[in-house]
Image: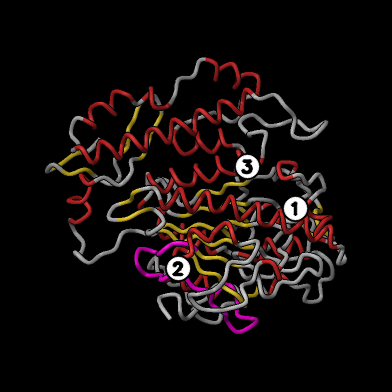
Amino acid sequence: MIISHKSLSRRTFLKGAGIAIGLPFLDAMSPALAFGRSAGARTSSRLAFVYVPNGIVMDQWTPKSAGKAFEFTRILKPLEPFRDDIYVLTGLASHNGNALGDGPGDHARAGAAFLTGVHCKKTAGADIHAGISVDQIAAARTVSETRFGSIELGCEDSRTVGDCDSGYSCAYTNSISWRTPTTPMPPEVNPRAAFERLFGTADLSLDPQTRARRERYRKSILDLVSEDTRSLVKTLGPADRRKMDEYLVAVREIERRIETAEKDNRQLKPGIEKPGGIPFTFPEYAKLMYDLAVVAFQADLTRVATLVVGREGSTRVYSEIGIPDPHHPLTHHRNNQDWIEKITQINTFHIDLLGYFIKRLKSTADGDGTLLDHSMIVYGSGLSDGNRHLHENLPVLLAGRGSGTLKPGHHIIYERETPITNLYLSLLDRMDVRPETLGDSTGKLDHLSGL
């Protein structure tokens, strides 16, 4: 570790046996951060995108009134405790998710266009082509300041190949993040692999049996850096010691939950093997992935993240809430009220889990505030009405304060057909990243800094 003039570098890591653990923001880092920058400089913002598939029951999502006194609809109700921390944004569209002469394939186009604003090439071969996504534009700017430019997480296996949607490559449904127009960034769906990428080294090329045998002899990563940890803690004041304790407890808890999942031999579905490290129940799975994003932000390992709750066209069943029917077929309800009710319950379930993420960010100290204060979290889908495959009037939430540049607590209604990429330009601007355009963008959004 590097400590000079009684200050601690923000890039300090605890190291040992191939492991490197980043640190949360500590008071001891303030002198180092203050050096070389103006006193008015703001804390670095984090940017995350959470994607849900197959559209939303929009009349149970959209508040009837605009402004600060908007009512929480049935689907949004779990977020009511966070009224002052979120925006509901109505009227945004993903025009390039539409067919535009290419016929069926709305699910593939929805996922591919959501963060890129680009109409993807209709192909089931290797000649895929979409656009550079907003998260990767931000990552290119922040990679020099963090260990990773971005992390891509998912809660559904994305190893499918070939034609996944009416002549569209599975690459479009597997990934919402694109480093280049021809290079998708598939999400990591195994919590163990994501954890080891963030905090250590792992040979993922080994066969499962060899890896399992090695895991039996594996120590906690915190044991491997224990000597470095003790040396650091001796130099810290009481407040920083408390922050370190809270952070290390969180990392240990994630390890414990992954280990528990690896020992759970139950099957997700008959005949489908459960990859090691993936919890059996979906709420456990989603919360674990959310927690990985939180600690990655907390330790400043990255400032950019995506989380795919489910792939477009997902057929996941939600037995945890009493719904054994596959998600995607339900969305083609043809006004069957029983099916609409089940979709509404799934949509609400996803929002409840988002509330867990927001609560974790809000309860995690970061500099002069919390991680939520210093984050911008976009939640949404590339489809609104899944029954009709609509790409207009998308369901979009924005949480966090962007290090003081956002003033949440409102339902804002924009003119219909406003490109969702205008939102992304506005968020990039708050990270001092200013591309002239992004996909089909036409400018930045008004009102995010106050009405």
The residue that label 1 is drawn on is 170
Q: Amino acid at mark 3?
A: Pro
Task: Note whether 305 is above or below 227 in the view shown.
Answer: below
Question: Which one is in front, 167 or 58?
Answer: 58
Residue that numbered label 3 is attached to: 283
In the image, 299: left or right of 268?
left
Cα separation, mark 1 vs mark 3, equals 26 Å
On the image, numbered disc 2 is attached to which residue? Answer: 428
322 to 79, vertically: above or below: above
> Which residue occupies 59% across, 16% down?
213
Residue 80 in sight here: yes
Q: Secondary structure at mark 3?
A: helix
Q: Nearer the viewer, residue 223 or 161?
A: 223
Q: Amino acid at mark 1?
A: Cys
User: Among all residues in the image, which is located at the extreme bottom?
Assistant: 415
Q: Which residues are magenta?
A: 399-421
Q: Amino acid at mark 2?
A: Leu
Give the image quarter of residue 140: bottom left
Instruction: Check disc 2 and report its element: helix, strand or loop.
Output: helix
Which mark, residue 410? none
Q: How far apart in space, not on screen, are marks 2 and 1 (Cα)?
A: 28 Å
Which callout, 3 or 2, points at the residue further toward the start of the chain?
Answer: 3
